[in-house]
Amino acid sequence: MVHSQQLILYMRTDNMNTTVIQKSISRQASMEACLFAIEKAEELNISINVSVVDNKGLEKAFLRMEESFIHSIDIAKDKAFTSASFGFPTAQWTEIFKQLPHLEQGFSNRNRLIPFGGGLPIFEDGAKVGAIGVSGGTEEEDIICAKYAIEKIGLK
């Protein structure tokens, strides 16, 4: 299976060409990750929403289980966006706010920033290729579903 695709961006500055190569999760891997997250949710007997985004935080795939919470749709999408944009699990914000409480007031009011578990970045060969966000279970259940999906598509 193709896990990622390479994007080559060209920029011209001062008569000099600069090439930037980025890896991003493929649509196939994105859809499979959603399906695997739902597979784990069914095993846990919960209903979830799951979103997979590319390395920039733009949505590649989304699935909603029939009995999932409607408010969890945007939460799953924002968990994936938050994790992709910062490159670390959304649950890490809890520790950051404990260590640097002055950041909580400003950051927790940011649009689309989710500071609790269920969003995980996705890496291939050390490069961030995307992120997954799961919402609908407990924080722990959401993390379990997200981790399972990443492992099942063969990424980290």
Image (cartoon, grey):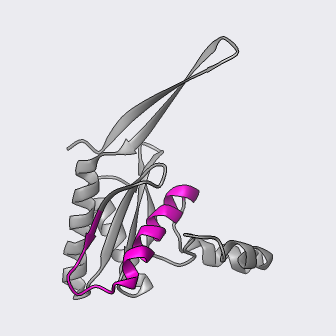
The answer to if 6 sits in the magenta stretch is: no
- Give the residue furthest to the top: 15
Asked if residue 66 is positioned above or below residue 112 in the image, the reply reads: below
Query: Which residue is located at x 34 percent, y 38 percent?
Result: 5
Q: In what quadrant of the picture does the N terminus appear?
A: top left
* 112 lies left or right of 40: right
* 43 lies left or right of 103: left
The answer to if 75 sits in the magenta stretch is: yes
The quarter of the picture where residue 93 lies is: bottom right
Query: Which residue is located at x 27 percent, y 61 percent?
Result: 33
**Main secondary structure along the magenta-highlighted residues:** helix
Q: Can residue 152 be seen by looking at this rendering?
A: no
Q: Can residue 34 be seen by looking at this rendering?
A: yes
- Give the residue furthest to the right: 102
Q: Give the total number of marks visible in the rendering.
A: 0
Q: List x then y, in percent, for residue 54.
A: 41, 51
Q: List x then y, in percent, for residue 95.
A: 65, 76
**Front residue of 135 and 12:** 12
* 10 lies left or right of 34: right
**Front residue of 110 and 150:** 110
Q: List x then y, in percent, for residue 81.
A: 48, 62
Q: In what quadrant of the picture does the C terminus appear?
A: bottom left
Asked if residue 88 is positioned above or below residue 65 in the image, the reply reads: above
Residue stretch rendered in magenta on the structure? 62-87
